[in-house]
Image (cartoon, grey):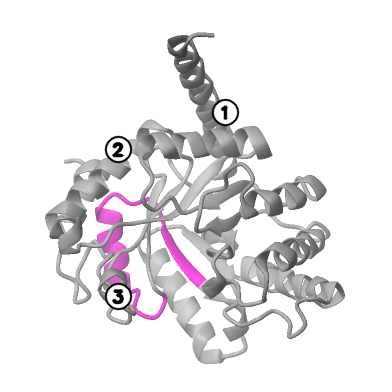
Amino acid sequence: MNSAHFKRLAASTLLMLSTVSQVHASELFPVLAANKTVGVQVKIQNFTAADAEQIKAAGFGFVRLGVWTNSLGSSAYQKQISDAFAAAKSAELPVLMTVRSTKPLTPKPGDTNELAAAGELFANSVVALEQSYSTQLVAIEIWNEPDLGKYWPTGNFDTTFAPFMSAMCHSLGQKPQTTPLVGFGFAKAPSPGSASTEALSKIVSDYPKCLSAISYHPYGLSDTQIGNVQAFIQQTFHLPGVISEWGVPSLITNGGVNGQASKVGTFISGVKKLNIPLTSLYEWKNSETGGNDRERNFGLMTSDGQEKPAKMATKALLNPQ
Protein backbone atom coordinates (compact mmCIF):
# COMPACT_ATOMS: atom_id res chain seq x y z
CA MET A 1 0.00 0.00 0.00
CA ASN A 2 1.49 3.36 -1.00
CA SER A 3 1.69 6.31 1.41
CA ALA A 4 -1.03 8.39 -0.27
CA HIS A 5 -3.52 5.50 -0.23
CA PHE A 6 -2.75 4.80 3.45
CA LYS A 7 -3.38 8.44 4.38
CA ARG A 8 -6.72 8.44 2.54
CA LEU A 9 -7.73 5.23 4.29
CA ALA A 10 -6.73 6.59 7.71
CA ALA A 11 -8.70 9.78 7.10
CA SER A 12 -11.83 7.89 6.05
CA THR A 13 -11.55 5.59 9.08
CA LEU A 14 -11.23 8.58 11.40
CA LEU A 15 -14.30 10.21 9.85
CA MET A 16 -16.30 7.02 10.25
CA LEU A 17 -15.32 6.61 13.90
CA SER A 18 -16.06 10.27 14.64
CA THR A 19 -19.54 9.82 13.17
CA VAL A 20 -20.14 6.74 15.33
CA SER A 21 -19.13 8.76 18.42
CA GLN A 22 -21.61 11.48 17.54
CA VAL A 23 -24.44 8.97 17.15
CA HIS A 24 -23.71 7.70 20.66
CA ALA A 25 -23.51 11.25 22.01
CA SER A 26 -26.92 12.29 20.75
CA GLU A 27 -28.40 9.42 22.73
CA LEU A 28 -26.28 9.78 25.86
CA PHE A 29 -26.48 13.54 26.45
CA PRO A 30 -30.08 14.35 25.52
CA VAL A 31 -30.16 17.55 27.60
CA LEU A 32 -27.62 19.16 25.25
CA ALA A 33 -28.80 20.66 21.98
CA ALA A 34 -26.69 19.80 18.93
CA ASN A 35 -25.14 23.28 18.94
CA LYS A 36 -24.66 23.48 22.72
CA THR A 37 -22.08 20.78 23.38
CA VAL A 38 -19.38 23.19 24.65
CA GLY A 39 -19.39 24.15 28.34
CA VAL A 40 -17.08 25.90 30.78
CA GLN A 41 -15.70 25.06 34.21
CA VAL A 42 -16.65 27.06 37.30
CA LYS A 43 -15.69 26.83 40.96
CA ILE A 44 -18.54 26.21 43.39
CA GLN A 45 -17.15 28.63 45.98
CA ASN A 46 -17.54 31.69 43.76
CA PHE A 47 -20.06 30.72 41.07
CA THR A 48 -23.07 33.06 41.07
CA ALA A 49 -26.35 33.53 39.22
CA ALA A 50 -24.77 36.53 37.50
CA ASP A 51 -21.97 34.28 36.22
CA ALA A 52 -24.52 31.75 35.00
CA GLU A 53 -26.41 34.43 33.09
CA GLN A 54 -23.22 35.60 31.36
CA ILE A 55 -22.16 32.02 30.59
CA LYS A 56 -25.54 31.34 29.01
CA ALA A 57 -25.36 34.57 26.99
CA ALA A 58 -21.90 33.63 25.73
CA GLY A 59 -23.38 30.52 24.11
CA PHE A 60 -22.14 27.80 26.46
CA GLY A 61 -24.39 24.78 26.83
CA PHE A 62 -23.46 23.72 30.36
CA VAL A 63 -21.10 24.29 33.28
CA ARG A 64 -18.65 21.83 34.80
CA LEU A 65 -18.08 21.86 38.54
CA GLY A 66 -16.27 19.61 40.99
CA VAL A 67 -17.57 17.90 44.13
CA TRP A 68 -15.24 16.28 46.68
CA THR A 69 -16.76 13.29 48.47
CA ASN A 70 -14.48 13.61 51.50
CA SER A 71 -16.04 17.03 52.23
CA LEU A 72 -19.69 15.97 51.98
CA GLY A 73 -19.99 15.64 55.75
CA SER A 74 -19.73 19.42 56.10
CA SER A 75 -23.05 21.28 56.01
CA ALA A 76 -21.23 24.42 54.81
CA TYR A 77 -19.79 22.47 51.88
CA GLN A 78 -23.16 20.95 51.05
CA LYS A 79 -24.58 24.48 50.94
CA GLN A 80 -21.84 25.54 48.51
CA ILE A 81 -22.86 22.68 46.23
CA SER A 82 -26.59 23.43 46.43
CA ASP A 83 -25.95 27.15 45.88
CA ALA A 84 -23.86 26.39 42.79
CA PHE A 85 -26.60 24.16 41.36
CA ALA A 86 -29.16 26.85 42.12
CA ALA A 87 -27.04 29.41 40.25
CA ALA A 88 -26.84 27.11 37.23
CA LYS A 89 -30.59 26.47 37.37
CA SER A 90 -31.33 30.19 37.39
CA ALA A 91 -29.94 30.41 33.85
CA GLU A 92 -31.22 26.97 32.80
CA LEU A 93 -27.66 25.68 32.46
CA PRO A 94 -27.25 21.92 32.98
CA VAL A 95 -24.23 20.67 34.93
CA LEU A 96 -21.40 18.24 34.28
CA MET A 97 -20.54 17.20 37.84
CA THR A 98 -17.05 15.81 38.41
CA VAL A 99 -16.82 13.73 41.59
CA ARG A 100 -13.64 12.63 43.37
CA SER A 101 -11.96 12.50 46.76
CA THR A 102 -9.08 14.78 47.65
CA LYS A 103 -7.92 12.41 50.41
CA PRO A 104 -6.47 8.89 50.13
CA LEU A 105 -9.22 6.30 49.76
CA THR A 106 -7.56 3.91 52.20
CA PRO A 107 -4.43 3.92 54.38
CA LYS A 108 -3.62 0.48 52.98
CA PRO A 109 -3.60 0.83 49.18
CA GLY A 110 -2.20 -2.67 48.83
CA ASP A 111 -5.27 -4.19 50.46
CA THR A 112 -7.71 -5.06 47.67
CA ASN A 113 -10.54 -5.63 50.16
CA GLU A 114 -10.16 -2.10 51.49
CA LEU A 115 -10.06 -0.71 47.96
CA ALA A 116 -13.25 -2.59 47.14
CA ALA A 117 -14.94 -1.24 50.25
CA ALA A 118 -13.83 2.28 49.35
CA GLY A 119 -15.23 1.81 45.84
CA GLU A 120 -18.61 0.83 47.26
CA LEU A 121 -18.67 3.85 49.60
CA PHE A 122 -17.77 6.13 46.73
CA ALA A 123 -20.58 4.65 44.63
CA ASN A 124 -23.01 5.41 47.45
CA SER A 125 -21.89 9.06 47.40
CA VAL A 126 -22.38 9.21 43.63
CA VAL A 127 -25.89 7.80 43.94
CA ALA A 128 -26.80 10.27 46.70
CA LEU A 129 -25.55 13.20 44.61
CA GLU A 130 -27.44 11.97 41.59
CA GLN A 131 -30.63 11.67 43.58
CA SER A 132 -30.22 15.27 44.74
CA TYR A 133 -29.41 16.85 41.38
CA SER A 134 -30.44 14.42 38.62
CA THR A 135 -32.81 16.87 36.93
CA GLN A 136 -29.91 19.27 36.28
CA LEU A 137 -27.18 16.88 35.23
CA VAL A 138 -25.68 16.44 31.79
CA ALA A 139 -23.56 13.63 33.21
CA ILE A 140 -21.56 12.62 36.25
CA GLU A 141 -17.83 12.44 35.64
CA ILE A 142 -15.89 10.11 37.91
CA TRP A 143 -12.59 11.62 38.99
CA ASN A 144 -10.26 14.22 37.59
CA GLU A 145 -6.75 13.40 36.31
CA PRO A 146 -6.17 10.22 38.34
CA ASP A 147 -3.11 9.49 36.22
CA LEU A 148 -1.37 12.33 38.09
CA GLY A 149 -0.24 11.60 41.63
CA LYS A 150 -1.55 14.99 42.79
CA TYR A 151 -5.11 13.89 42.04
CA TRP A 152 -4.77 10.22 42.91
CA PRO A 153 -3.48 10.26 46.50
CA THR A 154 -4.18 6.57 47.11
CA GLY A 155 -0.84 5.25 45.95
CA ASN A 156 0.37 3.56 42.79
CA PHE A 157 -2.15 4.24 40.00
CA ASP A 158 -1.22 1.05 38.15
CA THR A 159 -2.19 -1.18 41.07
CA THR A 160 -4.95 0.72 42.90
CA PHE A 161 -7.05 2.50 40.29
CA ALA A 162 -8.66 -0.42 38.46
CA PRO A 163 -9.63 -2.37 41.63
CA PHE A 164 -11.24 0.73 43.15
CA MET A 165 -13.13 1.70 40.01
CA SER A 166 -14.18 -1.88 39.32
CA ALA A 167 -15.70 -2.05 42.80
CA MET A 168 -17.46 1.26 42.17
CA CYS A 169 -18.84 0.04 38.84
CA HIS A 170 -20.00 -3.22 40.43
CA SER A 171 -21.82 -1.31 43.16
CA LEU A 172 -23.39 1.20 40.78
CA GLY A 173 -24.57 -1.61 38.53
CA GLN A 174 -26.82 -2.82 41.33
CA LYS A 175 -28.55 0.53 41.75
CA PRO A 176 -31.03 2.33 39.47
CA GLN A 177 -29.32 5.16 37.63
CA THR A 178 -30.43 7.39 34.78
CA THR A 179 -27.62 9.94 34.53
CA PRO A 180 -24.82 9.17 32.04
CA LEU A 181 -21.53 8.29 33.74
CA VAL A 182 -18.25 9.34 32.13
CA GLY A 183 -14.70 8.73 33.26
CA PHE A 184 -12.11 9.23 34.21
CA GLY A 185 -10.92 12.71 33.26
CA PHE A 186 -7.42 11.56 32.34
CA ALA A 187 -4.69 14.22 32.24
CA LYS A 188 -3.10 12.39 29.31
CA ALA A 189 -5.31 11.03 26.57
CA PRO A 190 -5.48 7.23 26.40
CA SER A 191 -3.01 5.84 23.87
CA PRO A 192 -1.64 2.39 22.99
CA GLY A 193 0.12 0.91 26.02
CA SER A 194 -0.55 3.86 28.34
CA ALA A 195 -1.43 3.36 32.00
CA SER A 196 -4.90 4.81 31.41
CA THR A 197 -5.52 2.40 28.53
CA GLU A 198 -4.44 -0.57 30.61
CA ALA A 199 -6.77 0.43 33.45
CA LEU A 200 -9.68 1.21 31.12
CA SER A 201 -9.30 -2.10 29.32
CA LYS A 202 -9.75 -3.98 32.58
CA ILE A 203 -12.67 -1.88 33.83
CA VAL A 204 -14.58 -1.67 30.54
CA SER A 205 -14.08 -5.37 29.88
CA ASP A 206 -15.45 -6.40 33.28
CA TYR A 207 -18.17 -3.72 33.44
CA PRO A 208 -19.08 -2.75 29.87
CA LYS A 209 -22.21 -0.86 30.94
CA CYS A 210 -20.57 1.24 33.66
CA LEU A 211 -19.35 4.17 31.54
CA SER A 212 -21.19 6.03 28.79
CA ALA A 213 -18.06 7.82 27.52
CA ILE A 214 -14.32 8.17 28.13
CA SER A 215 -13.22 11.64 29.29
CA TYR A 216 -9.74 13.13 28.97
CA HIS A 217 -7.88 16.46 28.89
CA PRO A 218 -6.02 17.11 25.60
CA TYR A 219 -3.89 20.06 26.69
CA GLY A 220 -1.38 20.91 23.97
CA LEU A 221 -2.81 18.54 21.35
CA SER A 222 -3.59 19.62 17.79
CA ASP A 223 -6.90 18.98 16.03
CA THR A 224 -5.33 16.06 14.20
CA GLN A 225 -4.01 14.54 17.41
CA ILE A 226 -7.38 14.93 19.13
CA GLY A 227 -9.05 13.30 16.15
CA ASN A 228 -6.66 10.36 16.46
CA VAL A 229 -7.43 10.06 20.18
CA GLN A 230 -11.16 10.00 19.44
CA ALA A 231 -10.66 7.24 16.90
CA PHE A 232 -8.45 5.23 19.28
CA ILE A 233 -10.98 5.46 22.11
CA GLN A 234 -13.88 4.42 19.88
CA GLN A 235 -11.96 1.56 18.32
CA THR A 236 -10.46 0.29 21.59
CA PHE A 237 -13.30 0.72 24.07
CA HIS A 238 -16.35 1.04 21.76
CA LEU A 239 -17.30 4.23 23.58
CA PRO A 240 -17.20 7.88 22.51
CA GLY A 241 -14.48 10.19 23.79
CA VAL A 242 -15.35 13.48 25.46
CA ILE A 243 -13.16 16.41 26.52
CA SER A 244 -13.95 17.40 30.09
CA GLU A 245 -11.14 19.95 30.36
CA TRP A 246 -9.00 22.00 28.02
CA GLY A 247 -7.62 25.50 28.30
CA VAL A 248 -4.75 27.87 27.68
CA PRO A 249 -3.46 30.58 30.04
CA SER A 250 -3.10 34.19 28.93
CA LEU A 251 0.65 34.33 29.55
CA ILE A 252 3.17 36.31 27.52
CA THR A 253 4.66 33.01 26.34
CA ASN A 254 1.29 32.22 24.74
CA GLY A 255 0.91 35.64 23.18
CA GLY A 256 -0.86 37.23 26.14
CA VAL A 257 -4.63 37.73 26.20
CA ASN A 258 -4.85 37.98 22.41
CA GLY A 259 -2.84 34.80 21.95
CA GLN A 260 -5.15 33.03 24.39
CA ALA A 261 -8.17 34.23 22.41
CA SER A 262 -6.70 32.96 19.15
CA LYS A 263 -5.89 29.52 20.59
CA VAL A 264 -9.31 29.18 22.22
CA GLY A 265 -11.02 30.06 18.94
CA THR A 266 -8.94 27.53 17.03
CA PHE A 267 -9.71 24.83 19.58
CA ILE A 268 -13.48 25.40 19.55
CA SER A 269 -13.56 25.37 15.76
CA GLY A 270 -11.59 22.13 15.77
CA VAL A 271 -13.78 20.21 18.22
CA LYS A 272 -16.88 21.29 16.32
CA LYS A 273 -15.45 19.93 13.07
CA LEU A 274 -14.57 16.68 14.85
CA ASN A 275 -18.09 16.36 16.29
CA ILE A 276 -16.78 15.92 19.84
CA PRO A 277 -19.90 14.95 21.83
CA LEU A 278 -19.09 17.12 24.84
CA THR A 279 -16.31 19.62 25.55
CA SER A 280 -15.62 21.73 28.63
CA LEU A 281 -13.25 24.72 28.63
CA TYR A 282 -11.05 25.55 31.58
CA GLU A 283 -12.15 27.98 32.97
CA TRP A 284 -14.69 30.82 33.33
CA LYS A 285 -12.68 33.17 35.57
CA ASN A 286 -9.03 33.54 36.47
CA SER A 287 -8.24 31.81 39.74
CA GLU A 288 -6.53 33.94 42.39
CA THR A 289 -5.78 30.81 44.42
CA GLY A 290 -3.70 29.20 41.67
CA GLY A 291 -0.24 28.13 42.71
CA ASN A 292 1.57 30.00 39.93
CA ASP A 293 0.98 32.48 37.11
CA ARG A 294 -0.04 29.73 34.70
CA GLU A 295 -2.72 28.33 37.01
CA ARG A 296 -4.03 31.81 37.81
CA ASN A 297 -4.63 32.90 34.21
CA PHE A 298 -6.73 30.27 32.43
CA GLY A 299 -9.93 32.30 32.77
CA LEU A 300 -11.98 33.70 29.91
CA MET A 301 -12.68 36.50 32.39
CA THR A 302 -10.47 38.16 34.98
CA SER A 303 -10.99 37.16 38.59
CA ASP A 304 -12.98 40.36 39.18
CA GLY A 305 -15.29 39.72 36.23
CA GLN A 306 -13.75 41.76 33.41
CA GLU A 307 -13.98 40.29 29.90
CA LYS A 308 -10.80 39.01 28.26
CA PRO A 309 -10.53 38.71 24.47
CA ALA A 310 -10.91 34.93 24.84
CA LYS A 311 -14.43 35.38 26.17
CA MET A 312 -15.38 37.55 23.21
CA ALA A 313 -13.80 35.08 20.76
CA THR A 314 -15.73 32.24 22.38
CA LYS A 315 -19.02 34.10 22.17
CA ALA A 316 -18.43 34.88 18.47
CA LEU A 317 -18.22 31.14 17.79
CA LEU A 318 -20.84 29.79 20.20
CA ASN A 319 -23.43 32.54 20.06
CA PRO A 320 -22.92 34.58 16.89
CA GLN A 321 -25.28 37.54 16.53
Q: Secondary structure at mark 2?
A: helix
Task: Point out the tag, 1 or 2, that comes first from the N-terminus.
Answer: 1
Q: Secondary structure at mark 3?
A: loop
Q: Which mark is residue 269?
A: 2
First to last magenta residue range:
44-66
Which residue extends farthest front?
2
Q: Position of residue 260 (x, y in %)?
A: 20, 55
Front one among 100 and 154: 154
Tell me the amino acid under the disc marked 1. Val
Q: Which mark is residue 287?
A: 3
Q: Is 185 one of the magenta-colored residues?
A: no
Q: Position of residue 52 (x, y in %)?
A: 32, 65
Which residue extends farthest right?
113
Quadrant of the frame with the N terminus: top right
Q: Which residue corresponds to mark 1?
A: 20
Tell me the amino acid under the disc marked 2. Ser
